[in-house]
Image: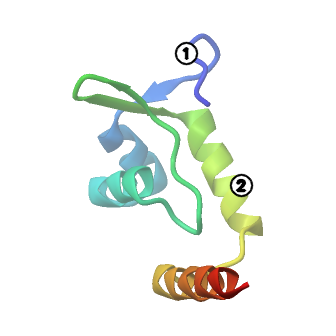
Amino acid sequence: MIELANETLLTVPQAAERLGCSCRTIRRWISTGYRGRRLEVIRCGRLVRTSIEAIERFQGTQETAPMVPPRRQARELARIRAELQRI
């Protein structure tokens, strides 16, 4: 969770520039995430801000998180749910 008092806030374009990616990528990490984690943000109406520290946390979790493609993950969850219903 972003702590306003202790973290340096960034706009989406600032975060994209800092990471060398597009604003669209940052927005995708915010909305759908990557490898099971979402980029932390603070929303105030239509304003969206992340922080340098949130980016560092997001990047740190990506190194240890196993890569599971979203479609495969969805199929696996559906299979597990079906199996649990049979029990």
Q: Residue at 66%, 63% (x, y): give it.
A: 62
Q: Secondary structure at mark 1?
A: loop
The residue located at (59%, 89%) in the rendering is: 79
Task: Give residue 28's position: percent from left, percent from top.
Answer: 36, 59
Using the image as rendered, state which of residue 35 and residue 14 is in the foreground.
35
> CA–CA distance between discs 1 and 2?
20 Å
The quadrant holding residue 57 is top right
Q: Position of residue 43 (x, y in %)?
A: 36, 27
Q: Residue 4: give its label.
A: 1
What is the x, y in percent for residue 63? Answer: 72, 66
Q: Residues within 10 Å of mark 2 (few under 14, many from 20)?
A: few
Read off the residue under disc 2.
Answer: 60
Task: Residue at the far left: name it.
Answer: 46
Element under disc 2: helix
Q: Amino acid at mark 2?
A: Gly
Q: Quadrant of the C terminus?
A: bottom right
